[in-house]
Image (cartoon, rainbow, N blue to C red):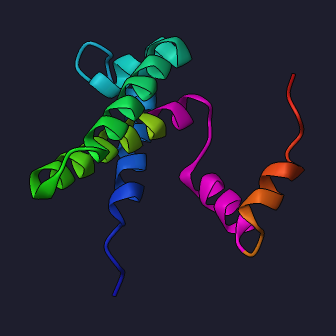
Amino acid sequence: MSQPMRPLDALEETIRQRATGADAGKSYTAKLLAGGVDKIGPKVTEEAAEVVEAAAEPGDEGRAHFVYEVGDLLYHTLVLCRSRGVDLAEVEAELARRFGASGIAEKESRPKSN
């Protein structure tokens, strides 16, 4: 018996399908992908700001709003990943690589940018 697809995997597959076959006039995802980083990047930035704002909201309503906004951020981030040809599995592998390493040590090991 096969297990149902995880929601993030299903979302990634839908985004992949929109990247290859959808008319940008009929699909928001296809429209974003057609615009590339110039179109998707500002949406990721906007959604990230909304996540931070929602995180400060009190109570159950604030928590629900936060979850909603994180969903938007994940969606737009996955669209940006698709525009760069990056699969969720690659991101998961990068996160797995970091397990067992101090966050401070991992950050210090990154190449320094100017």
Q: In the depicted view, which residue is nearer to us: 98 or 35?
A: 98
- Whether residue 114 sits left or right of residue 77 in the image: it is right
Measured from the top left, where is residue 50 in percent x and y?
31, 32
Is 103 above or below relative to 21? below
Instruction: Point out the image quarter for the N terminus.
Output: bottom left
Asked whether residue 96 is drawn in magenta, I would say yes
Instruction: Point out the image quarter for the C terminus.
Output: top right
Secondary structure of the magenta portion, mostly?
helix
Could you tell me which residue is drawn at 35 percent across and 49 percent down?
11
Quadrant in the rendering for residue 53? top left
Q: How many marks?
A: 0
Furthest residue toward left: 61
Could you tell me which residue is drawn at 88 percent across and 35 percent down?
112
Is 34 above or below relative to 19? above
Could you tell me which residue is drawn at 44 percent across and 30 percent down?
19
Measured from the top left, where is residue 86 in percent x and y?
62, 41
Is 6 above or below relative to 46? below
Q: In the depicted view, which residue is nearer to us: 72 or 14?
A: 72
- Whether residue 111 sits left or right of residue 69 in the image: it is right
Measured from the top left, where is residue 21 in percent x and y?
38, 28
- Whether residue 25 sits left or right of residue 40 in the image: it is left
Measured from the top left, where is residue 27 in percent x and y?
26, 24
Could you tell me which residue is drawn at 31 percent across and 73 percent down?
4
Magenta-colored span: 79-99
Asked whether residue 105 is drawn in magenta, I would say no
